[in-house]
Amino acid sequence: MMRCGRFHYHAPRTLRDACAMLQDAGSDGMLLAGGTDLVPNMKRRQQTPKVVISLRHVAGLRDAGPDGNRVRLGAMLTLSDLTAKEEVRARHTALFKAAAQVATPHLRNMGTLGGNLCLDTRCNYYDQNYEWRKAINFCMKKAGEICWVAPSSRRCWAISSTDTAPALIALGAEVALATRDGERTLGVADFCRDDGIQYLTRNPDEILTQVLLPIPAPGESSTYWKLRRRGSFDFPVLSVAAWIRRPPEGRVEAARLVLGSVASRPVIAEAAAGLVGTTLSEDVIEAVAEEASRLAKPLDNTDFSLGWRKKAARYLITGALRELRGDDPQTLGPLARRAAELAPVG
Amino acid sequence: MSASGGVTPRAESRTRLSLRVNGEPVEVLFETYKTLLEVLREDLGLTGTKHGCELGECGACTVLVDSRPVLSCLLLAAECEGSHVRTVEGLAQGACLHPIQETFADLGAAQCGYCTPAMLMTACALLEKHPSPSRGDIRQALSGVLCRCTGYLQIFEAVEAAERRIRENSPGGSEGGG
Ligand SMILES: Cc1cc2nc3c(=O)[nH]c(=O)nc-3n(C[C@H](O)[C@H](O)[C@H](O)COP(=O)(O)OP(=O)(O)OC[C@H]3O[C@@H](n4cnc5c(N)ncnc54)[C@H](O)[C@@H]3O)c2cc1C
Ligand code: SF4
Ligand code: FES
Ligand code: FES
């Protein structure tokens, strides 16, 4: 048996208590939500908290509902809870498709929205057991000095592999963060940071309590395309979240494109500006996809070959934009056909 | 039971917990670092639930917690206070197998058998929630458990056969229903 190390376990019932416990624990403490990221990391000794503060029994963190022109989604909603919500499926397509393609149904029954946004970054040299990492000498993400992917680098390049973060950035969502002293909100885009070790701007004493999602205005649509080796279990190797506002038969008024799993944070493609004012003709889509795919500068620390992943970026972006144009998913290849069958079972 | 948690830490490193396992109330004292899988197998002697990867990558350790299939290798047992945990040991009623067990045996849906407890529990949860799932629903629900032997086809067929058997045996169930 591969076992977790020893720790003190707390199961607070109120957010206030949870915040106090987290602050008191200082750098020894970590929050436990569904545990599908933290528990394997504890078994592999990538993360070694001395104090584990469970959010499972904290009141209010599973609430969801409208709030003015936004929807509030509690951080402890499981990904299954989320995909079972008809309004998420119908209105926030990018989030639905992202959440419905995380891992497996079993893991989605456990994994939470908040945990997904705070998911640790990934790297082939880091996602290994203790003995493996010790044998080649630990890297700087945990206990070592060097980066095995880029040995002359002073930073860690581990990859942001969350499916929901790119989708939520494309949808213009915010997160609410609570401490003992109060709450602040910030855009999901500003919550993420381009560093494999400090990959969030979250302060150590902050608890993510909710996601705030704008209710789409007429003409707004979104989608999420994910590349992975198998249609179940696997983390994204590349993903694209796209959002546009376009009146029926009209021209695009606003657009956002976000690439996932290409850096230590989701990457916003400025090239999306090239969609505004157009009717999404094939030429426009191809030019924007070409430019946006240049942001995908994959490193050799995940699945698939480098060159192929770069080519795949253009394919995914083109597909997502064609889908938002209104093309029939059945004509858009196997990824789109499979995504069209996503249904909340489990 | 402590006011803050409902889980009583004892000597800090051990936890005492009350939960229900296969319908029976159970109280168990265990090392706090243990997952539900470790507590089931090592402290409760329920070895029907298998351990494979122990990292969430195979599904062999699936049990039902409050009717949902979850991976017991990633769930700290301390998190299960007051939960109802169902394992493969609870499927049969005395000498009478659950229909899903019968059809797995009849149709060759188990070969080495290592994934079988997880497949059975996942299928059981699916049939309780969706009494007549499509082949697509079955594929999706079982996509969280790997099988290295069967190629899955017999497993899908066994779930469909169990669904028919349950329907035919239920009061008011019709033989020819769609
Ligand atoms: C085999 C396998 C496949 C997977 N595939 C995917 C995949 O395809 N896509 C994907 O995105 N993920 C995947 N995951 C990772 C994980 O299952 C999901 O990201 C899940 O949503 C994590 O949520 P959790 O609640 O389990 O997080 P936990 O493990 O509980 O926590 C994750 C991290 O977030 C912190 N945290 C949790 N909640 C909060 C909060 N409210 N406030 C502040 N910090 C918090 C924790 O301290 C921890 O550092 C996979 C995992 C496994 C084991
Ligand atoms: S990118 Fe480098 S430092 Fe970061 S986890 Fe991988 S090997 Fe370690
Ligand atoms: S033992 Fe493999 S998922 Fe739990
Ligand atoms: S029967 Fe052998 S793994 Fe499924």
Image (tube, coloured by chain):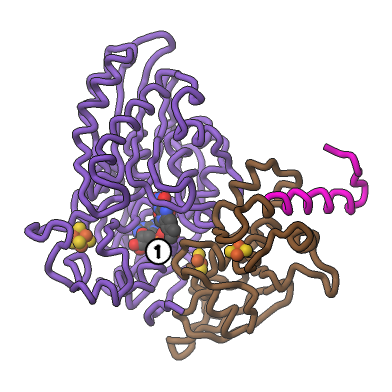
Chain colours: A purple, B brown
Q: Residue at 71%, 44% (x, y): give it.
A: B133
Asked if the magenta segment contains residue B174, the reply would be: yes
Identify the magenta region.
Answer: B156-178
Q: What x and y, as percent, mark residue B53?
A: 47, 69
Q: Is mark 1 within 8 Å of ligand 1?
A: no
Asked if the magenta segment contains residue A265, the reply would be: no
Q: From this view, report whether residue A156 is shown above or below residue B21.
A: above
Left or right of residue A23, residue A151 in this image: left
Q: How many marks?
A: 1
Q: What x and y, as percent, mark residue A61?
A: 47, 55
At label 1, counting other C-alpha atoms closer than 10 Å, the crowd grade (few under 14, some 14-19, many 20 or more) is: some
Q: What x and y, as percent, mark residue B164?
A: 82, 48
Q: Quadrant of residue A168?
A: top left
Q: From this view, report whether residue A23 is shown above or below residue A154.
A: below
- Callout 1: SS: helix
Q: Residue at 23%, 30% (x, y): give it.
A: A292
* Residue A114 seen from this side: no
Magenta residues, dominant SS class: helix
Q: Residue furthest left?
A: A152
Q: Residue at 17%, 62% (x, y): give it.
A: A148
Query: What residue is shown with label 1?
Result: A16
Residue type, mark 1 in image: Arg
Q: Residue at 18%, 67% (x, y): give it.
A: A139
